Image: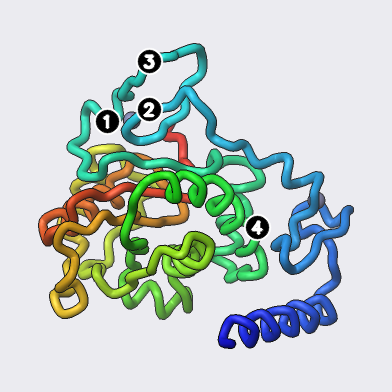
Amino acid sequence: MSLDWTQGWKSWLEASLSFLYPEVCQFCSRERATVSEGFIGAKCRQHAMFIQAPFCSRCGLPFDGEITTAFECSNCKEMELHFVHARSAVAAQGMVLDLIHRYKYQRALWLEPFLAGLLIQQAAPALRAEKWDWIVPVPLHPLKESEREFNQAERLTQRLSTATGLPARNNLLRRVTATRTQTQLSRSERASNVQRAFAFDKKNGAALKGKRVVLVDDVLTTGATTSACAKVLRAHGASEVCVWTVARGLLK
Ligand SMILES: [Zn+2]
Ligand SMILES: [Zn+2]
């Protein structure tokens, strides 16, 4: 019954939004795009570069050329990563990177169905084929969250949870230090920047023991942030942690 109600509400909401907002692609302004498409039209969707093999078996970094055996990239060999593997739907470049910035920093929430759709398209079949228990978002510091008014990782987690049926657990991790933004930092600076940034919430995490956890964020670059989260989850009983993000940043 609640499902019907939700769907009724959703179609009502979509109908009202399409009345308020013209159905125009928000990237090129030259094609039709609906609310449920995240206002990105069919032509522009083709700009999204899906990450395909070959890629690093640990962190998912795509690699040019022909490699048929499993390999780990130099990023992973240098870092002590606490997740079993990380995967991303698309490369964080061009249109996708622009849309992620608009979504996060200009509160362009109407782009979310498109961005979450990329994640769901790639992650849901993989997660269904494996056995995972919970989906957990990378937390934002409360100050940052109140400034931004939402945590993008939490919203993406919710959508992936709905698509896969895996429960979302938003309150296991807390960000305890407001870290500097990672974008200008080198690989080793990123790792030390986030080392003690996350804490575990014992009252919400009593049942974590033995659980296999999917950690979700919008972008993964070196894996420093998600690895720091995975370390905390493992230290409090998670048996395995994997990572899924919408996009994969490519460090120059
Ligand atoms: Zn377009
Ligand atoms: Zn790697």
- Name which of mark 2 and mark 3 comes first in the sequence: 2
Dot 4: what SS? helix
The residue under label 2 is: 56
Dot 3: what SS? loop
Q: CA distance from mark 3 to mark 4?
A: 33 Å
Dot 1: what SS? helix
Residue 171 visible to the viewer: yes
Q: Is residue 67 above or below residue 45?
A: above
Q: CA distance from mark 3 to mark 1?
A: 16 Å
- For the residue with label 2, is its CB less than 8 Å from the closest atom of ligand 2? yes
Q: Residue furthest front?
A: 1
- Name which of mark 4 and mark 1 comes first in the sequence: 1
Labels 4 and 1 touching (C-beta < 8 A): no
The residue under label 3 is: 69
- For the residue with label 1, is its CB less than 8 Å from the closest atom of ligand 2? yes
Is residue 185 found left or right of 189 in the rendered image?
Answer: right
Q: CA distance from mark 2 to mark 3?
A: 10 Å
Q: Check disc 2: other Cα within 10 Å, few if <14, some if 14-19, many if 20+.
A: many
Q: Quadrant of the N terminus?
A: bottom right
Q: Amino acid at mark 3?
A: Thr
The residue under label 1 is: 76
Q: Check disc 4: other Cα within 10 Å, few if <14, some if 14-19, many if 20+.
A: many
The residue under label 4 is: 114
- Name which of mark 2 and mark 1 comes first in the sequence: 2
Q: CA distance from mark 2 to mark 4?
A: 26 Å
